[in-house]
Amino acid sequence: MTQELIQLRDVTKTFTVARKAGRVRRRFEQVHAVDHISFTVAQGTMVGYIGPNGAGKSTTIKMLTGILVPTSGQVRVAGLEPSRNRVELARRIGVVFGQRTQLWWDLPLRDSFDLLRSIYRVPGARHARNMAAFTELLDLAPFLDVPVRQLSLGQRMRGELTAALLHDPDIVYLDEPTIGLDVVSKAQVRDFLTGINRERGTTVLLTTHDLSDIERLCRRILIIDLGHVIYDGDLPTIRRRFGDERTLVVDLEEAGPPIDVPGAVVDRVEGSRQWLRFHGHQLSASELVARVAERVRLVDLAVEETDIEDVVRRIYLTGRS
């Protein structure tokens, strides 16, 4: 039976915020950063946890790591209450924050890994085995003896991932792990995470604004907005429910007025090229092409799917309504 490594039951986190109420006076308000959320994450899964800025993602992660104590509700990670078992839990989790570092800035990368081995009390043989594996998987050898401050962003992120996983955590929290990386570095990080999840069964909770990371890594996503979970499911279901709108792009032999065809609306015309928006559940692409071909002479065509960012934006708006 699959074990649920992360459990949140009716969790809230409330902060008291001071607001100006005149030149001198202040009034205090209660802000619900997380508002009665509940979800579980099973062992060995990769879950995307996404939402706009201020939605409650970082607050959730801080409660899962024990940095923050929930105002109410129950949080369990690997069977432990994070805020009361921070030291024990630290040996079971790994954390990567895209804009923060757990490496020693002026030391060679290799020395940071040695220090982390001592901090986590990793046996020498296991540390050496993991170092060899990660060095090969992430191509660390060329810069292991380079001070961290001299590493490129992509090299440092590979070092951060290694630092988070050297002690074989059950769970790793990733906050913007590919932020600022070039295409090649992003691909390396994604391939590494996929391999770690598949081969070691490491559970991954990923928060990011780069939805291409979610598409390539996660089968399940949780969307949070204004402290509430507004969607919990897979990407295909999201596309069916919120992303059935598609666009047919046609190149005509001659420029002309917008094509009048039932079931579609012309969004844009640029010379002989037109963009026709239609709903996939009402009309198939082949049917629309046939209707267009009856009215005009086509040179070329293409069907564009709805961008995942647009889909998620619609879900945000639906959640707020």
Image (tube, helix red, strand yellow):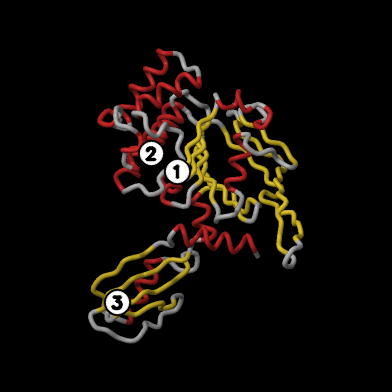
Amino acid type at image mark 2: Met
Amino acid type at image mark 1: Gly
> What residue is shown with label 1?
98
Side of 224 relative to 219 (left or right): right
At mark 2, the secondary structure is helix
How far across and down, in percent of the image, does residue 42 sit? 57, 34
Position above or below: 55 against 166? below
Task: Report the front residue among 59 and 312.
Answer: 59
How far across and down, in percent of the image, does residue 209 sit? 47, 52
Which quadrant holds the N terminus?
Answer: top right
* Spatial separation of the CA atoms under disc 2 and disc 1: 8 Å
Give neighbour class at mark 3: few <14, some 14-19, many 20+ (Cα, 10 Å).
many
> What residue is shown with label 3?
273
Tell me the quarter of the picture where residue 84 sits: top right
Please report contact status of discs 2 and 1: CB closer than 8 Å, yes or no. yes
Give neighbour class at mark 2: few <14, some 14-19, many 20+ (Cα, 10 Å).
many
> What residue is shown with label 2?
157
Tell me the quarter of the picture where residue 113 sits: top left
Lower sequence index among marks 2 and 1: 1
Please report contact status of discs 1 and 3: CB closer than 8 Å, yes or no. no
Position above or below: 124 against 61? above
